[in-house]
Image: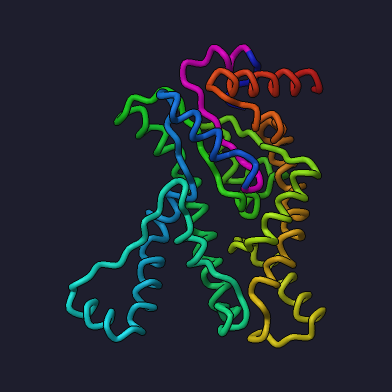
């Protein structure tokens, strides 16, 4: 690992970390706290996806909808209005909206083939954004003078890697530049994430084989045709399965490539010093268990 002891981490003049785990467990909260401390550059992978790699897809999709409205169509055709997304670190809704949900078009669903196409676009975009990490480390230092760096990843990072492969290209690249830290939730956190998702289902990204297995199982269980599936019902049904699918992948990433910190401990972080000591404690625990 980039820092193999707590002492090396504490003394490092340039601290670089990558946070991973399920959305909703504190990755962005800690990243923003560190950014506000003044000496950390916050690299949001999801923001990079939405602005660099999927921005054109998102804008074109919005224009496609606007072209269905005669008033807006005329303005677009005469270049009288501009349509674009307003993505921020705290508002990534344009990315989620573009990904969409499969099912009944009358309820806002996408045909499964189109949904799969957008999922594949997102997979390529996320991998590219993850591999941009080194560029942003160098950019943050050369352009802005930030000594420290935090990479705030999306929950789907585990879908595109093989943590058991010591030559995995994505993990090899990331671990060479950052200390990888898994924010691990408890069973209570998982239950709360499921409840939160059930109240407001949001688009997700899945590995192609996992999505196919879930889609086919859901159709078989419900007996519905593809264009009669309630999009929210399907992604609710899939979400708990996605959590169970991702948990061992995150654990293997932490075991083979980094560290684990508890989400409860992350929730108690109130300062840069708190975070430094949290990671130091995880390094000490890993060394003791070796």
Q: Is residue 49 magenta?
A: no
Seen at 65% across and 16% down, the residue is 5
Q: Position of residue 49 (x, y in %)?
A: 45, 54
Q: Is residue 66 left or right of residue 149?
A: left
Colour scheme of this structure image? rainbow
Residue 208 position, x and y percent, is 64, 66
Please state if 25 lies on the left or on the right of 127 as rendered: right
Give the answer, above or below, for where 213 lies relative to 133: below
Residue at the image point whose x is 47% and y is 47% from the top: 90
In the image, the segment drawn in magenta is 7-23
Whether residue 30 sits left or right of residue 241 in the image: it is left
> Where's the N terminus, which quadrant?
top right
Q: Is residue 20 magenta?
A: yes
Residue toward you, 277 or 230: 230
Q: Is residue 123 above or below residue 116?
A: above
State the residue at coordinates (36%, 71%): 60
Quadrant housing residue 181: top right
Residue 137: horizontal and vertical position, in percent? 42, 33
Q: Nearer the viewer, residue 78 or 259?
A: 78
Closest to the observer: 29 or 204? Answer: 29
Query: Where 113 falls versus 254 (above or below)?
Result: below
Among the 4 quarters of the image, the one containing residue 123: bottom right
């Amino acid at each position: 690992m980039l820092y193999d002891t707590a002492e090396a981490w504490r003394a490092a003049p340039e601290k670089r970390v990558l946070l991973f785990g399920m959305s909703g467990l504190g990755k962005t909260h800690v990243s923003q706290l560190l950014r506000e401390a003044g000496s950390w550059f916050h690299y949001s992978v999801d923001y990079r996806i939405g602005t660099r790699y999927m921005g054109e897809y998102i804008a074109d999709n919005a224009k496609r909808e606007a072209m269905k409205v005669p008033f807006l169509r005329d303005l677009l055709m005469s270049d009288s209005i501009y349509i674009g997304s307003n993505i921020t670190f705290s508002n990534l809704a344009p990315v989620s909206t573009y990904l969409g949900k499969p099912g009944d078009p009358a309820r806002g669903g996408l045909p499964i083939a189109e949904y799969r196409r957008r999922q594949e676009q997102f997979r390529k975009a996320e991998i590219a954004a993850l591999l941009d990490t080194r560029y942003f480390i160098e950019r943050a230092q050369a352009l802005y003078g930030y000594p420290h760096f935090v990479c705030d990843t999306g929950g789907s990072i585990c879908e595109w890697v093989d943590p058991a492969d010591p030559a995995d290209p994505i993990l090899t690249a990331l671990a060479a530049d950052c200390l990888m830290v898994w924010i691990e939730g408890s069973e209570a956190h998982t239950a709360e994430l499921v409840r939160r998702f059930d109240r407001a289902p949001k688009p997700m990204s899945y590995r192609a084989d996992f999505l196919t297995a879930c889609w086919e199982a859901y159709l078989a269980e419900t007996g519905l045709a593809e264009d009669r599936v309630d999009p929210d019902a399907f992604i609710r049904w899939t979400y708990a399965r996605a959590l169970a699918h991702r948990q061992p992948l995150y654990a293997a990433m932490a075991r083979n490539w980094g560290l684990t910190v508890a989400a409860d401990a992350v929730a108690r972080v109130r300062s840069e010093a708190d975070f430094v000591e949290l990671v130091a404690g995880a390094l000490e625990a890993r060394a003791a268990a070796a």
